[in-house]
Image (cartoon, rainbow, N blue to C red):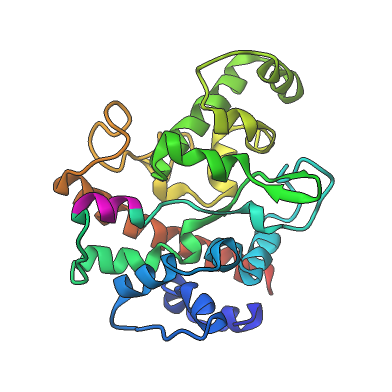
Amino acid sequence: MTFDELMKLSEEEFINYDFKKEIFNLRHLKYDENNPIANIILYKGNIYGSLSDCDRLPLILEIYKRLWGNEFEFWNTKQTDFVEANGETMNSFVTPYKALYKETYNLSNPLFNEYAILTHTVGNFIPVYAIEKDKNWSSPFNIKRYSSTYDYWDITLNHIKVILNDVEDSNESIENFFKILQNSNSVKYKKYIIESAKWILSFNTWPNFVEKNFLQSFLENPKDLTSEPKEFWRKHFKETVSTKDENNLIEFLTFVNNAIKERSSLIYKQLHSKNT
C-alpha cells in the first residue's frame, strides 16, 4: 500500500488497518482475516527479523516524516530522514499473551483477537531516538526499554513524565539539564531514559510530549495534558511490572484496545489536515 492509498481509507478502515498485511504481502504469505492471533504468531515467527518489523516499514517511516518531520531530536546526528531504528511498537502482544496462555495457543479470546490486530496499527507505533555509530543505526530506547517495562507503555510514560517534570522543576535550561544528566550517576531515571534524553527533553514539557505524540488517550484524563499516565491495571506502577493475573490482563486489554484506536483516530485527522 502506498501513502496515498492509505489516505483514501475511511477513518474506521485506517484505525483498524493491520500493517502485518504489508509484511505478509512482502513475504508472499496469506493473511487470514478471520484469525488475527494466528496472523501475529506467524508474523512473530518470521525469519527475516528487523527487515519485517511493521513499525519501521517505508510506509510507516513516511507517516513519521509527515507527522513529526525534524521538529524534535530523533537522531544523534543532523539526520533529517527517519530510519528503521526510529520505529517502536508501544505495547507488546507477546508479553501479555504468553503470561496468560503460557505454552498453549488460544485463538478464540475476543480481546486478544482485537489486540492482535491493533498491536500493529498506527496507533501503537511511535518514532523514538536513534543513534548512528559506524554507519549503523540502533535505538537505546527500543533495545533497552523491555527490561524495565516489559513493553507496557504506561510504565514507559511514567518514566518519561518523571524526567520532564524534573526539568520544569529544576529551573535549568534544557541544555544545562542535559549536561548535568550526562555527568550524574543518578539511579532515579532508567538507563533507556537517560540514553534517549536528547529526544525526550527536546519536547521540553510533559504536556507537549503528550500532545505532539497524540498520547491523550493514554492519560488518566485525556482532556488534561498535565494528567498522569493511566495505569493499565491497579497498582501497576507500584508492584510488579508484568502480571499473570487474568483480571489484570482483561483490564489491560479493555483499556489499551480503546486507547490505541483513539490515538489512531487523532493521527488520521492530523494526517488529513496536513495532506489537504
Q: In the figure, 35 relative to 133: above or below? A: below
Task: Tell whether 241 sits left or right of 131.
Answer: left
From the viewer's side, name the closer residue of 185 and 170.
185
Q: In the figure, 54 relative to 26: above or below? A: above
Q: In the rendered picture of this protein, how many numbered marks are placed on residues?
A: 0
Q: Quadrant of residue 73?
A: top right
From the viewer's side, name the closer residue of 163 and 104.
104
For the C terminus, the quadrant is bottom right
Task: Tell whether 253 sits left or right of 43.
Answer: left
The residue lying at 19 percent from left, 61 percent from top is 104
**Residue 160 x/y as whole percent:** 52, 33
Task: Tell whether 131 sits left or right of 268.
Answer: right
Q: In the figure, 50 relative to 165: above or below? A: below
**Residue 6 x/y as whole percent:** 57, 79
Which residues are the magenta region?
95-100
Inspect this view and state whether residue 171 appears.
yes
**From this viewpoint, which residue is outermost toward the right?**
78
The residue lying at 61 percent from left, 68 percent from top is 57
